[in-house]
Image (cartoon, grey):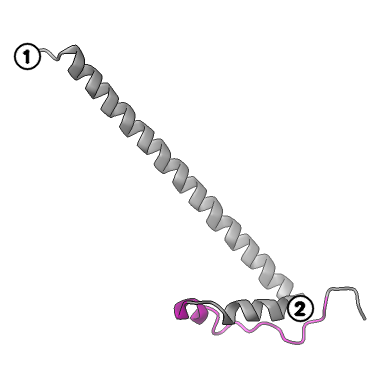
Amino acid sequence: MAETELERAEKRYAQAKARLQALRNREATKQRKLDTRRKVILGGALMDLAERDSKAAAMLDRLIRNLSREQDRKAFAEWDAPSSAPTDDGAS
C-alpha cells in the first residue's frame, strides 16, 4: 500500500521535530558543560586567592560555613583556608 502525501508529510514533520529536539538537547548539554567549567575555574581562582589574601580566605570560609547542604560542607571538611595569609591589598 503506497503512502499518501499526507502520511509522507507527517513522517517528515516527525523526523524534523526529532532533529530539532536533538539539537536543543545538544545545545543544553553544551551550555551545562560550559557553566560547570566556569564554576570550576572560578572556584580554583578563589581558592588560590584565599591562599594569598586573608580577606579572600575569610570570605571563602564564610561561604563554606553558609552552604545549605551538609554534604556540600563536608566536601571542604579537610580543606583549611589559610587564616594568616598576607593581604593582597597593598597595605603594610
Task: Identify the residue at image location x=53%, y=57%.
Answer: 36
From the viewer's perspective, is residue 2 above or below residue 62? above
Residue at 55% across / 51% down in the picture?
A: 34
Q: Amino acid at mark 1?
A: Met
What's the CA distance linking mark 2 and mark 1? 77 Å
Front residue of 92 and 67: 67
Quadrant of the image containing the N terminus: top left
Residues under numbered marks 2 and 1 in contact, where contact means CB atoms less than 8 Å apart: no
Q: Amino acid at mark 2?
A: Lys
Mark 2 lies on residue: 55
- Which of the 4 quarters of the picture holds residue 45? bottom right
What's the magenta region? 69-87
Q: Whole-percent x and y of residue 43?
A: 62, 66
Q: Which numbered circle lies on residue 1?
A: 1
For the residue labelled by badge 1, is the local secondary structure a helix, a strand or a loop?
A: loop
In x, y percent, where is residue 84?
77, 87
Asked whether, in this view, residue 21 is left or right of residue 54, the answer is left
Could you say which is closer to the camera, residue 18 or residue 68? 68
Is residue 83 found inside the magenta-colored segment of the image?
yes
**Whole-percent x, y for residue 56 in the image:** 73, 75
**What residue do we see at 56% from left, 84% from top?**
78
